[in-house]
Image (cartoon, helix red, strand yellow):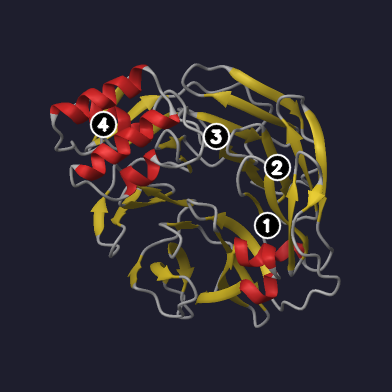
Amino acid sequence: MSHLIDGWRRRDAIRPQLDGPLAGFTHAGLVDRPGWFFVTPNELTGADLETGETFFRCALPLTLDGQANAVALSSSDDGRFVAVAQAQGRQGAVIDVTRGEVVLPLARGDYHPEHCAYPLCFLDDRRLVHAVEWNQLAVTDVTTGERLDPRIESPKLDYFFGALTRSPSGRQLASTGWVWQPMGLLGTLDVGAWLAGSAEASLRFGVDSDAWDLPMAWLDDTRLVACVLGFDRTERLVLSTVGANEPIASIEQRAGAAVALRRDEVLVLGERIEAFAAHDLSRLGGPGVSAYAWHPGSQEALSFGSMEGAAPWALVSRPRAPWSVDEHLVSLARREQAHPSAHGRQVLADALEAAGHHGEALTHLRSHDAHGRRCFVVDDLASG
């Protein structure tokens, strides 16, 4: 069942059988299906909320120590691997979903881990960025266990890495970490420069905050949106460029559970979804429903009664604006719908660009990320 709420579509989701309250959740890869991973105090579960299929279940390979909502969680682009760690603890693990086994144990040092979220983020299908010390990150190939980053025996960064978020291309990382005072500081890493040299050389700092580990999202490889807390205790949403101390735009807005990008809109998720224009953060309204996580492949938010996963569950999306397209584009899109392929998406992207369209649609069609049988750009174009 589905219905519209102030221009947003809400449809029922099938809640998987979960062993206890939620301690964390993330989308399952970037394929265009509403697949998710959920963590309870005892178990890790993978489920498709559209069909109700539970595609993975295993015992949680670490102890949560009674912390509420206490895991950091990240899935590889193809959904084969999932990394889970104690949010304010030291231990973690990478699990191969196809085998149901731990393939890589994770650990970070014991210097104040309780004060920042465990840094954890997949760059693609196999490369995982994770903390090894409070001020040192590593990149590991989870299929082989090989460290890919330049090892630094004596880290010199005076920066506590916090929650990590990658840019859409995977070329940039951002950390909502902190420095002693204490003060939150948005740090960004150019992944290519880091792997060719050192994190110290490639780390750049941006907007400061009186709190850290707050939600953020990349718009592209140079711009990001983050929730911050001003030193006057005012909660704000800011639009910033990499390394800039002053934001491009800043508005008063309560921090949510997550920040997500939907085409040219920024969504702040939480007890009430709020939407903003990506270029200047002007308010676009919202459906007045709660949502706590975003699936970039299916372009849907996961909504339920509380952060602990109370019923009812739903998937919430915003109907997309119609395209101005001719018969040729519609024909190409319908052909791609019937027989999805990377080549077909490239042909469609070229035709779309030739017709004068630009922006996120072309980026999505030309992306090397995993695509499922459903693609929101293809569906939009095929509908005419």
Q: Residues within 10 Å of mark 3 (few under 14, many from 20)?
A: many
Closer to the observer: label 2 or label 4? 4
Residue at which label 2 appears: 83
Please report whichever mark, 1 or 3, sits nearer to the chain's N-terminal start.
Answer: 1
N-terminal of the pair, mark 3 or mark 2, is 2
Disc 2: CA contacts within 10 A as few (<14), some (14-19) or many (>=20): many
In this view, the residue farthest toward the bottom is: 181
Can you give x and y, in whole percent of width and height, for residue 288 in the image? 31, 43
Tell me the SS state at disc 1: loop
Answer with the quarter of the image where residue 211 lies: bottom right
Separation (CA) of disc 4 from disc 3: 32 Å
Callout 4 amino acid? Asp
Mark found first going from the N terminus, 2 or 1: 2
Q: Position of residue 53 (x, y in %)?
A: 57, 17
The image shows residue 271 at horizontal and vertical percentages of 42, 47
Marks 1 and 3 close (CB-CB < 8 Å): no
Circle 4/circle 1 CB separation < 8 Å: no
The residue lying at 25 percent from left, 58 percent from top is 283
Q: Which label belongs to residue 309?
A: 3
- Return the x and y of residue 181 as percentages of the image width and height: 65, 83
Tell me the tag on residue 165.
Answer: none
The mark found on residue 119 in the picture is 1
- Distance from label 2 to label 4 (Cα)? 33 Å
Q: Earlier in the sequence, mark 2 or mark 4?
A: 2
- The picture quadrant where one finds residue 79 is top right
SS of the residue under disc 3? loop
